[in-house]
Image: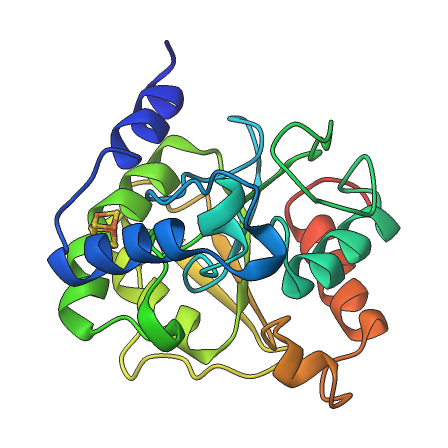
């Protein structure tokens, strides 16, 4: 088993945050009426995408009835509908939809992951839960040949910067601020010739996409730029 596959397996067994363990399992037991006949995943969600991905997309945490139900990042919810349609449009996904873990979807050169792996109540992990989860993402990023990361939303941005510092990149002080379309380049402490490009993108949540704050074209523009910076062509 590869190091990344082993990491994915280990993360699904984590029970380090009592509040999140209780919540993810309760949601999986009670379910939403529309999914009453389904077996929820109800565990931490590993990253999704190939082990040699030079591009990563980092959200915040699994959705209670999305990834916490299907076991795959951004799969089975409205946020994922927007994200995967955009990934397909720019040539990074084999299909525009992501409905369940066995739907045949493949990602090309991109891995989707998160700084918090368990669905939190009200989509809000506590600072302690975020810190508990940090080593998982730090290890994942240190195993990937990552050259660019698209960060979805300000919370993900704030959570990711300490992860990047832990994984060996130099994060400037004061910390760079999140914004849609913002680009920041970090130097590797151990590999100065391997910079990491960070790109900000508003989160693909319904709050942003239903109000028009974030359009499909805006997501595609950021993804296209990230693809180019990651060396995946334009
Ligand atoms: Fe473990 Fe992270 Fe889930 Fe906490 S949020 S239980 S650290 S996987």
Q: Which coloring applies here?
A: rainbow
Residue 117 drawn at (x, y percent): 34, 51
- Left or right of 94 in this view: 19: left
Using the rendered image of the protein, determine whether residue 199 is visible from the camera's viewpoint.
Answer: yes
Rendered location of residue 133, percent (x, y): 22, 53
How many numbered marks have been drawn onto this rendered protein structure?
Answer: 0
Foreground pick, 223 / 21? 21
Question: Which residue extends farthest top?
Answer: 1
Residue 217 x, y percent position in the rendering? 85, 71
Residue 18 relative to residue 206: left or right:
left
Viewer-closest of 203 and 90: 203
Q: Residue at x 59, y 78 (%)?
A: 182
Q: Residue at horizontal 33%, vertical 42%?
A: 43
Which residue is at 39% across, 56% downward?
30
Q: Is residue 72 visible?
A: no
From the viewer's perspective, is residue 167 above or below residue 151?
A: above
User: Residue drawn at (80%, 78%), measured in percent from left and top?
Assistant: 215
Residue 163 in which image quadrant: bottom left
* Residue 233: percent from left, percent from top: 80, 42
On screen, residue 221 above or below 99: below
Left or right of 230, for residue 4: left
Q: In which quadrant is the N terminus drawn?
A: top left
Looking at the picture, tell me which residue is in the foreground, 47 or 172.
47
Q: Is residue 110 above or below residue 163?
A: above
């Amino acid at each position: 088993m590869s190091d990344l596959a082993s990491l994915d397996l280990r993360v699904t067994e984590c029970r380090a945050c009592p509040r999140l363990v209780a919540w993810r399992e309760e949601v999986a037991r009670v379910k939403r009426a529309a999914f009453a006949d389904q077996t929820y995943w109800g565990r931490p969600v590993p990253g999704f995408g190939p082990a040699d991905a030079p591009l990563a997309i980092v959200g915040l945490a699994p959705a209670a009835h999305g990834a916490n139900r299907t076991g795959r990042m951004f799969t089975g919810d409205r946020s994922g509908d927007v994200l995967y349609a955009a990934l397909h449009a720019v040539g990074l996904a084999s299909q525009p939809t992501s409905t369940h873990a066995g739907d045949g979807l493949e990602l090309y050169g991109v891995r989707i992951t998160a700084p918090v792996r368990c669905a939190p109540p009200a989509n809000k992990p506590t600072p302690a839960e975020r810190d508990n989860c940090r080593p998982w993402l730090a290890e994942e990023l240190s195993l990937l040949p990552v050259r660019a990361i698209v960060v979805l939303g300000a919370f993900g941005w704030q959570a990711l910067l300490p992860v990047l510092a832990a994984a060996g990149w130099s994060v400037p002080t004061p910390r760079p601020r999140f914004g849609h379309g913002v680009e920041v380049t970090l130097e590797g402490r151990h590999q100065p010739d391997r910079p990491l490009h960070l790109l900000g993108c508003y989160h693909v949540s319904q709050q942003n996409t239903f109000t028009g704050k974030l359009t499909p074209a805006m997501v595609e523009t950021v993804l296209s730029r990230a693809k180019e910076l990651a060396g995946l062509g334009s």
